[in-house]
Amino acid sequence: MRMMTAAVAALVALVASPAPGFAQSSAEMETLADKDVPAAVATRMKCKSPSGPTKRRPFSGGFVFVQACTEGSDVQVRVVYATDRDGTGARILQFHRPEGRRMSALATVSFLPAENEIAGTTGRLTRRICRAEGRWRMEGKQPAPGLVFWRQTRDCDGKTGWQTVTGRAR
């Protein structure tokens, strides 16, 4: 329980960010001009209304490209993984929920390179889940996010009612 509390505290600290969608220091993320975004990456982003530039950083033996997109009134962050900085093998990352459904975007995204994990939050998922937080570890020969930790609440402010749905050992 104590280890889980520390993990939750670390996750909350990582996703609390002044910039919408991103919780990274600017030294780690490289901002790309639109003309510098590889075509394979831009195609997979499927971002109709970008709300910021595409950013790139090395991660999990390749590179992740991140872009915030406005969908309705919400900002959703999409993450594309490629084997090199030029976008070779680009694919949108799918983040699994505990019941098996996949999400192709998150409300906020943080990269934890030491753990080879991506942490993120979501907004309302169902009538009963208003907010959720998760961590996914990049696993496999072609790295893909595997769910490690998930908690959710009915409280849209995220102050009370948290339930841990899954917590896998690191």
Image: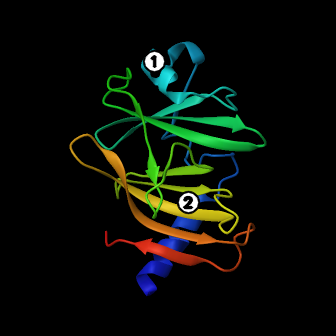
The local secondary structure at tag 1 comes to loop
- Please report the residue visible at 60 percent of the width from the left and 46 percent of the height from the top: 22
- Please report the residue visible at 67 percent of the width from the left and 31 percent of the height from the top: 52
Q: Position of residue 161 (x, y in %)?
A: 66, 80
Q: Position of residue 83 (x, y in %)?
A: 30, 30
Q: Quadrant of residue 53?
A: top right
Res. 145 mark: none
Q: Quadrant of residue 2?
A: bottom left
Most extreme residue toward the left, as rendered? 141
Give the mark nearer the N terminus: 1 vs 2: 2
Q: Position of residue 106 (x, y in %)?
A: 58, 48
The relative height of residue 160 versus residue 41 in the rendered view (above or below) is: below
**Residue flagged by tag 1: what amino acid is it?**
Pro
- Please report the residue visible at 65 percent of the width from the left and 35 percent of the height from the top: 69
Pick the quarter of the image with the N terminus: bottom left
Circle 1 is placed at which residue position? 38
Circle 2 is placed at which residue position? 14
- Please report the residue visible at 72 percent of the width from the left and 72 percent of the height from the top: 155
Q: Quadrant of residue 141?
A: top left
Q: Nearer the viewer, mark 1 or mark 2?
A: 1
**Residue flagged by tag 2: what amino acid is it?**
Leu
The relative height of residue 115 versus residue 149 in the rendered view (above or below) is: above
